[in-house]
Image (tube, rainbow, N blue to C red):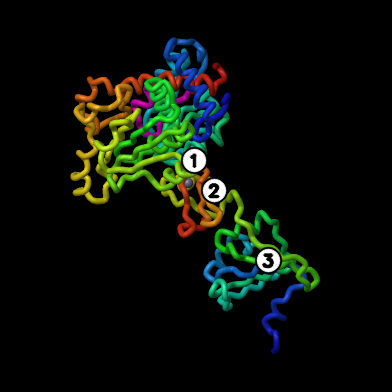
Amino acid sequence: MKNKSLVSITDYTKGEYLSILDTAAEFEKNSYQDLLKGKVVATLFFEPSTRTRLSFESAVNRLGGRVIGFSDANTSSVTKGETLYDTIKVVSNFAELIIMRHPLEGSARYASELSKVPIVNAGDGANQHPTQTLLDLYSIRKTQGTLDNLKICMVGDLKYGRTVHSLLMALSQFGANFYFISPDELKMPKEYKMHLDSLNLHYQESKDINENILDADIIYMTRVQKERFSDPIEYERTKNAYVLKGEMLSGCKNTMRVLHPLPRVNEIDQEVDSGPFAYYFEQTENGVYVRQAIISIILGLK
Amino acid sequence: MKNNILEVSAIKDGTVIDHIPAGNLFKVISILRLEEIKETITFGTNFQSKKLGKKAIIKLSNVFFKDSDINRISLVAPEAKLNIIKDYKVVEKKIVEVPDEIQGIIKCVNPKCITNHEKIITKFSLVDKKKIQLRCHFCEKITDPSLIEKI
Ligand SMILES: [Zn+2]
């Protein structure tokens, strides 16, 4: 994986996922290691995403590296009309690794083909956000002890949610069993179901959240956004049907955990936070270790 | 006057492309960049065809295509047949094959794709040869054949 850009979750193999997760576990035990001392990493955020940027910058800082970059296209030369081509050609002279978030889909793949240094995709529009998927895998393995043959319940916006799509692609290599719970307008796209069919993996679809969570190992919640609905009345009718409440979780497996890519709006009731099943805040902590692992492996330091 | 059309367009050496859907003749011309060719080109369209309804034919003198170039027309003329002519005789017959990868020619359907915002040569891989479904190398979205739009 040395010098190999991470653009899409499908760029890496199952074995490579696992070695990233193992390295992340080492960083969880000992997060502050001066592996990047004297090295410069660029964070180019062409659209703001404070949480993701801080997680990456924390990872670089814990490794003793320095960060240059911008957090918003308005503070960069992009507002003067500079192309992505020019920005990458220039910045790849300044840093040993570029972490990039961009609102246009395919921008990270394009950048990886222009850049002298590896690119880590921190989100390209609705397309890919592979470090999120790897931290999801890490959180799942840590809470379940394995990634093999788990029952994964995905809830909410399964149509536009790139995190659930990438997670499905990654988990499908480990023989998962999926429950898709969403309103009709936001069902899992056909291409992903065809992918599961081709691997003979089982999945079930439902509109009812209560029906299927009792034997789940993981409940993966997503935001149901108003702008995704063509009919605002339909949104009002469905928005509360996909809210996870404390009482719904009684009877779930003891080992079950609730994940969410965050930020949340109201889809997980705050009373769930203090219960035994909530894991979404730990999930963000895991993100730092996973990003430390990805950066140090790509730079050949681990 | 007998065989008038044939005589006008018969070629000594070159290539005849037959079974082009009439509606896609001009797409084929532009995909093959025939406007840049200085040799004699004859084409006819709206011939009756049992298979295609109406078909078009292109005859090119002294022009021979590489397979990789001619296969690019498979997106708009998947049934096209080629006759290679040497000294007025058909010396070889070819069919077009849908390639595994297509560079340039078509535009990604995704308005949020980087290829629609910067000067980038598009690149697609074929995920389904029968239905001609193409996945964009950059944004990873599938472009459906009905939406294929030439750049
Ligand atoms: Zn595209």
Magenta stretch: give its range: A41-55
The answer to whether B135 is drawn above or below residue A53 in the figure is: below
Q: Quadrant of the N terminus of chain B?
A: bottom right
- Dot 1: within a 10 Å radius of its alpha carbon, few (fewer than 14), some, or many (20 or more) residues? few
Could you tell me residue A181's position as x and y percent?
A: 30, 40
Q: Reading the chain from its start, which is encountered first: label 2 or label 3?
A: 3
Q: Chain of mark 2?
A: B
Q: Which residue is mark 3?
A: B82
Q: Which mark is residue A199?
A: 1
Could you tell me residue A196's position as x and y percent?
A: 45, 41
Q: Chain of mark 3?
A: B
The answer to whether B3 is drawn above or below residue A145 in the figure is: below
Q: Is mark 2 within 8 Å of ligand 1?
A: no
Q: Amino acid at mark 1?
A: Leu
Could you tell me residue A265's position as x and y percent?
A: 24, 32
Q: Amino acid at mark 2?
A: Phe
Q: Amino acid at mark 3?
A: Leu
Residue at image position (38%, 37%) is A178
Q: Which residue is mark 2?
A: B124
* Quarter-of-image position of residue A177: top left
Distance between the alpha carbons at the discs numbered 2 and 3 = 25 Å
Residue at image position (27%, 40%) is A225
Distance between the alpha carbons at the discs numbered 1 and 2 = 24 Å
- Dot 2: within a 10 Å radius of its alpha carbon, few (fewer than 14), some, or many (20 or more) residues? many
* Quarter-of-image position of residue A162: top left
